[in-house]
Amino acid sequence: MARALRGKVAVVGTGTAGMGEAPGRSAIELLAEAALAALDDAGLTLAEVDGLFTATSVHAFPTLSVGEYLGIRPRFFDGTNVGGSSFEAHLLHAAIALEAGFCDVALIAYGSNQRTAGGKFVSFSEPYPWEAPYKPRVPLTAYALAASRHMHVYGTTREMLAEVAVAARAWANLNPQAFAKGPLRVEDVLASRMVSDPLTVLDCCLVTDGAAACVLTRADRAKDLRKPPIYYLGAAGAQWHRAISSMPDLTITAAAESGPRALAHAGVSISEVNLAMLYDAFTINTILFLEDLGFCPKGEGGRFVQGGAIAPGGRLAVNTNGGGLSCVHPGMYGMFLIVEAVTQLRGEAGERQIRPCDVALVHGNGGTLSSQVTAVLGSARTL
Amino acid sequence: MTTEPSPGPEAQFRAFLAEGRLMVQRSRTTGRYVFFPRIAVPGSGECDLEWVEASGLGTVYATTVTRQRPNPDGSSADYNIALIDLDEGVRMMSRVEGLPPAEVRIGMRVKARIATIDGAAQVVFDPA
């Protein structure tokens, strides 16, 4: 049945706002700007939106706040919050709702001003009683622990982690919207300030402002809109824990479950994926997801990324916008993964455009390696 | 009809700790140990959990050093955070003390000690 959604709905518009720094703007102002840009991209109007999917780090009832702000009275709404992977979950839920006729035009939107509002990672996540006494820096500590374990079990090195940051920067240097630019070498990452061993500040994502949105319709309508439709092929989520101390094995994420399930729904094999958009909150993420999604065997992720293998011109195009590490990371990054995948699948990525690009895998991560949601998008040639 | 007031597993665990005892739950029928304390075994739902005293022995599963600005006197304010696998087969977050935080190694054998952190009894570990 999940397979029946393949190609039935499409992303018809995307938009961003306030990428990097947007002083003086509130989160919801940025979100609304991105939403209107996405509708304009599609050639649709706000009045046509009847499905609303949103989550932020500052709104307890996000569909209520965003619905009120934009004046949307949705027939269907979903404020699922699984951290940064929320928007991949929304994509799945929007596909289900559209195909079942619960709505006709679905808007997924996110916005944050965390950089100019304070410069720190913003979360209203509740303190976790079994970890808080030891003063972890959430989420940094959790990813550092995972990296320590991966290095211990598989011989992954700090140099391999650094390669992920270097590749992300090389892509960012080709992206006019990216926030962090300039040359970056493995030695620079190794020499930067250690924040939680083995992760340095350059192993960690940016703290930026930014908003992103996309609009979906059923495929029949999508064909008549302004831009070529980018089709939903499949998606799946998996979650195995909330806190890092409850993660069964710190070297295996639930992407090992969500990835194969999403690919099966999409009818796509991993070797057909042209673009991998992997949620890189920290350098270890990219390595874990390359393994868990099946791009390389378990434990080989560090060696897989060596020698510029995921940088421009490498063997696999990964995070071509520059990722959370060098493009944008306003707290919950997942919506930006979708925007970049659509940009590449449309052939609108300018200097960083990859060819061919017909199948993109988008992988969202939320919490502390907790929620994993994989989606597969494709061009018309995949139908 | 109201439920008799009685402390739940979390409150019981903390009361044991305040008495200086590290207790973990174990299912009477399956023998499986559970941490953090719950009202039932996760995944299978057995409600036959009993408290048993943990050996306090464990192994470092993962470790990190939280880097901080130095203290006003110039001394290091860095501190360890580790995941410890107790010999009973359950994992907990804690910290390893008694050696510089960067010298904590995965696989290191450690022994639990009950310390006071911010006014409350908590479990920390020392090299065994």
Image (cartoon, coloured by chain):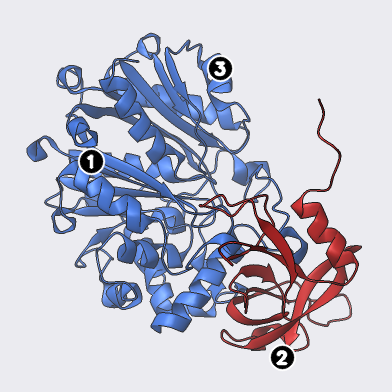
* Dot 3 amino acid type: Tyr
| Side of A284 where A262 appears, left or right | left
Q: Which residue is mark 3?
A: A69
- Residue B34 in the image, given as x and y percentages of width and height: 63, 62
Picture layout, residue A356 above or below residue B107: above
Chain letter of disc 3 in the image: A
Kindly indicate whether the residues beneath marks 2 and 1 are on one polypeptide chain.
Answer: no
| Closer to us: A121 or B30 | B30
Q: Residue at 52%, 63% (x, y): give it.
A: A204
Indicate which disc residue B128 carries: 2
- Determine contact: label 3, label 1, CB under 8 Å: no
* Dot 1 amino acid type: Leu
Quadrant occupied by the N terminus of chain B? top right
Picture layout, residue A33 above or below residue B86: above
Q: Residue furthest front?
A: B29
| Closer to us: B1 or B89 | B1
Q: Earlier in the sequence, mark 3 or mark 1?
A: 3
Chain letter of disc 1 in the image: A
Q: Which residue is mark 1?
A: A377
Rendered red, the chain in question is: B
Nearer to us of marks 2 and 1 is 2
Q: Residues within 10 Å of mark 2 (few under 14, many from 20)?
A: few
Please identify which colour was used for chain A in the image. Answer: blue
Q: Secondary structure at mark 3?
A: helix
- Residue A167 in the image, given as x and y percentages of width and height: 34, 66
Q: Quadrant of residue B117?
A: bottom right
- Residue A282 in the image, given as x and y percentages of width and height: 48, 62
